């Protein structure tokens, strides 16, 4: 039998086995056949507007989790709020890039310690490709630990780790350091290691990478950490149809419907749905051209229609904190 055909058959068998196996959500004690969702907001700490959007999405909407970009300027404001409301599910949005033109940040470990993470302006590289080209895995791990250290110095113990712009998934060496820190520090990490139905399509996941996620998922579970069954990360690309007037009502209706469609298409299991909620002032468009996308995410999260759909469908909303607590009870 040719190697390619054999490999394809093995992957098909893995898919069939995954379909028959209990989901990680079931292993955590959630009911079989249920969609269990972490509605997660990225980019807290990046700006005042980002902080306000994240908090409104959680306080007034259906978002359940958030992660913080520790090298950024508005981190103190967000962490001070977390100290007042420690029940908020907040992790670290591990940041190895600085993508905006006029508003930038550098590594917390300092340039001498992580020279490969720094560009000619003294900030982190603006894109993932340059991080891969210039930075070593040792430098990546050093910066991950520096960001965790700052959080802990501020009295902020993260509920999980995830990756800004997906940089930590760019190479196997980066992934290895990412999960290493999570396992050593007993902090859950965002990595879909289950059936991965949505993320395989959305990210064009290769068969090799899918097989790797299955292995890593088992490794994380055996280390005492909860594991995602799937990941939904397409909302950043949702744009109003051409010719549609940009109004608050149109933006909210469009984004809400897109989230309803996304939730409808998910398979049962523990899934993290990623969004970027911002409540923009006149300053935010100077920082980023993503104002409409981020404002739309916030409007969807606070839309009663989205909440009603979630309740009608019996979707269970959860947090990383709860997932870790449940994992601690599983032998």
Image (cartoon, grey):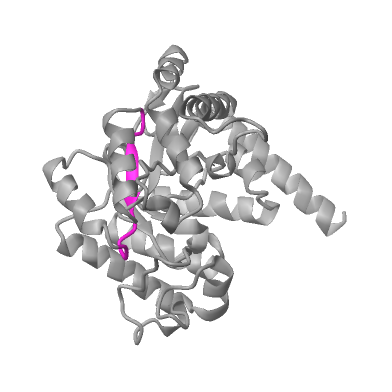
Task: Tell which of 241 and 300 is nearer to you.
Answer: 241
In the foreground, 113 or 172 = 113
Q: Position of residue 88 (x, y in %)?
A: 23, 40
Quadrant where the image shows the C terminus: top left
Q: Is residue 69 visible?
A: yes
Residue stretch in magenta: 62-72
Magenta stretch, main secondary structure, is: loop
**Residue closest to the far top:** 312
Question: Could you tell me residue 210's position as x and y percent?
Answer: 62, 50
- In this orientation, does residue 189 appear? no
- Looking at the image, the residue that sits furthest to the left is 84
Residue 81: % across, % down: 17, 46
Front residue of 213 and 259? 259
Task: Give the residue drawn at x 57%, y 42%.
Answer: 234
Tell me which residue sits at (51%, 52%) in the image.
Answer: 289
All told, the count of numbered labels is 0
Q: Is residue 164 above or below residue 260?
A: below
Q: Quadrant of the N terminus?
A: bottom right
Residue 246 drawn above or below residue 115: above
Residue 67 lies in the magenta-colored region: yes
Residue found at the far bottom of this picture: 112
Task: Identify the residue at horizontal 67%, vertical 33% (top origin).
Answer: 243
Provide residue 95's location: percent of width, then percent of height. 40, 63
Residue 5, magenta (yes or no): no
**Residue pictured at 33% horizontal, 41% vertical:** 53
């Amino acid at each position: 039998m040719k190697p390619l055909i054999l490999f394809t058959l093995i992957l098909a068998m893995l898919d069939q086995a995954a379909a028959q196996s209990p989901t990680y959500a079931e292993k955590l004690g959630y009911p079989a056949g249920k969609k269990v969702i972490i509605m997660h907001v990225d980019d807290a700490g990046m700006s005042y507007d980002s902080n306000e959007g994240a908090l409104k999405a959680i306080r007034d909407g259906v978002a359940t989790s958030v992660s913080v970009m520790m090298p950024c300027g508005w981190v103190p404001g967000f962490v001070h709020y977390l100290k007042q409301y420690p029940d908020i599910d907040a992790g670290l949005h591990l940041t190895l890039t600085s993508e905006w033109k006029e508003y930038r940040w550098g590594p917390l470990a300092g340039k001498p310690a992580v020279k490969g993470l720094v560009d000619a302006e003294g900030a982190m590289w603006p894109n993932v490709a340059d991080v891969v080209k210039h930075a070593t895995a040792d430098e990546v791990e050093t910066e991950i630990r520096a960001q965790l250290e700052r959080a802990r110095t501020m009295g902020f113990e993260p509920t999980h780790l995830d990756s800004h712009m997906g940089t930590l998934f760019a190479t196997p060496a980066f992934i290895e350091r990412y999960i290493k820190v999570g396992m050593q520090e007993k902090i859950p990490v965002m990595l879909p290691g289950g059936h991965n139905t949505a993320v395989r399509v959305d990210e064009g996941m290769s068969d090799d990478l899918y097989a790797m996620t299955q292995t890593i998922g088992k490794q994380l579970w055996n280390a005492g950490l909860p594991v995602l069954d799937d990941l939904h990360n397409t909302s950043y690309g949702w744009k109003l149809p051409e010719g549609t007037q940009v109004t608050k009502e149109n933006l909210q209706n469009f984004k809400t419907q897109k989230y309803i469609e996304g939730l409808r298409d998910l398979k049962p299991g523990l899934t993290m749905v990623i969004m970027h909620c911002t409540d923009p002032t006149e300053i935010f468009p100077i920082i980023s051209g993503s104002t409409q996308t981020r404002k739309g995410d916030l409007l969807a999260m606070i839309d009663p229609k989205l909440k009603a759909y979630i309740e009608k469908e019996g979707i269970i909303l959860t947090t990383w904190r709860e997932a870790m607590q449940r994992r601690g009870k599983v032998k």
